[in-house]
Image (spheres, helix red, strand yellow):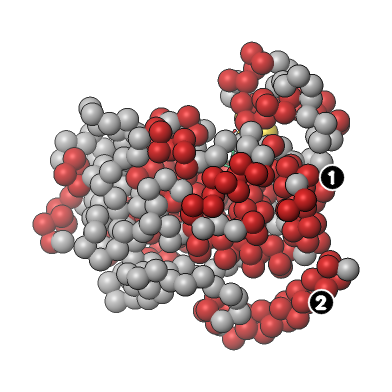
Amino acid sequence: MGCDNNIGVSLASFVLVSSLLLLSPILYVSEAQNYPPIVKGLSWDFYDSICPDVEHIIRNHLKKVFKENVGLAAALLRIHFHDCFVLGCEGSILLDGTAGETSEKLAAPNLNLRREAFKIVNDLRKLVHSRCGRVVSCADIVALAARDAVHLSKGPYYNIPLGRRDGVRIATSDEILADLPPPSFNTTLILITLAPKNFTTTDVVALSGAHTIGRSHCISIADRLFGSSIDPTMDPELAQHLLKLCPDLASINSTTAFMMDPRTPNTFDNKYYINLVNHQGLFTSDQDLYTDNRTRDLVTKFAANQTFFFEKFVEFMLKMGQLSVLTGDAGEIRANCSARNNETYFSTYPVVEGKKWATY
Ligand code: HEM
């Protein structure tokens, strides 16, 4: 019955959203959805006068990038998540280490972030800074790239408030481990980990839908295959398939990769939830959303109604994208996304537009 109601509601909202889309994408963003409040210092029109083409530049470049390597869409989306959850959306994940500090990229949860995607972020930064000067932060570039990654993979479009600034601190490995839950966590543990960030049960189910694109490795499913028995909530056929790729404990550090949503691996859709209903979720943190009574109904609803999933996913992304942002005079606008400005002079990374630094 809940499902029928939901389909009715979502049909109405689909009609509403479609008509609003015909009018303007901005109307869709600001009025058709229940948007979370915007934090002080961010705004929808932040770059309108200082870099009006920023979104266009990023989108155009990413279209070319994804044509060459569609997997980078998933990689960019994941970088935004790993940025925002640790110290907030302030680009600390992008920083290389220094003599005294280890880069966040080398912490266990970040080891499988794709290195090519960090290069794309710096390429985007170069393109944007060479057009507008050093006025757009790396943190905003990551947020916009993640939004475009979702939309260019056929997911929802949403506007994002801008004006984030880049941080000057690298998180410790304890901070990273506390903020990024491992895939072996069940729903209870994920809810506990995410509660301090004010994420609701609906957010937790919606955010996991990001696993509709991208890839994974044996290490992330080891708990399900190599416990005292194979996880009984995993479809036996999927288990046999995965055991061919990851045959034993020794294989968990292999570089073998497999798509997280084999139904439509590169399309941002609701098939992830259909996988869960069929016991074909990959991680414990995924599949347990269908086992746990608190989240099972939402999984079923998202599986039945993609529009409803998209609405809730966008709400989550807007909340996540504003976690502990730095605004105003806080932080800086990095000249190179991989290094803080006071380190840039010593960096071996080529900074082509260095002459502009004096102007800002
Ligand atoms: C419950 C929280 C989450 C857990 C435990 C989790 C865990 C993981 C793990 C273990 C992988 C695969 C790593 C590998 O083996 O290579 C992965 C991949 C991925 N995750 Fe999550 N994740 C979570 C939330 C999110 C969120 C909030 C997003 C984005 C909004 C996200 C987006 C992705 C994407 C797109 C990939 C594929 C990356 C690629 O193909 O390079 N995840 N996640």
Ligand 1 contact, mark 1 (Cβ < 8 Å): no
Is 320 on the left-hand or right-hand side of 32? Answer: left
Is 100 on the left-hand or right-hand side of 124? Answer: left
Which corner quadrant holds the C terminus? Answer: bottom left
Q: Position of residue 168 (x, y in %)?
A: 25, 47
Q: Residue at x 66, y 79 (%)?
A: 17
Residue 153 visible here: no
Amino acid at the residue labelled 2: Gly
Residue 44 visible here: yes
Is 57 on the left-hand or right-hand side of 240? Answer: left
Which corner quadrant holds the N terminus? Answer: bottom right
Disc 2, SS: helix
Which labelled disc corresponds to residue 278? Answer: 1
Amino acid at the residue labelled 1: Asn
Q: Position of residue 14 (x, y in %)?
A: 72, 77
- Give the CA distance from mark 1 to mark 2: 24 Å
Q: Residue at x 35, y 52 (%)?
A: 90
Q: Position of residue 277 (x, y in %)?
A: 82, 48
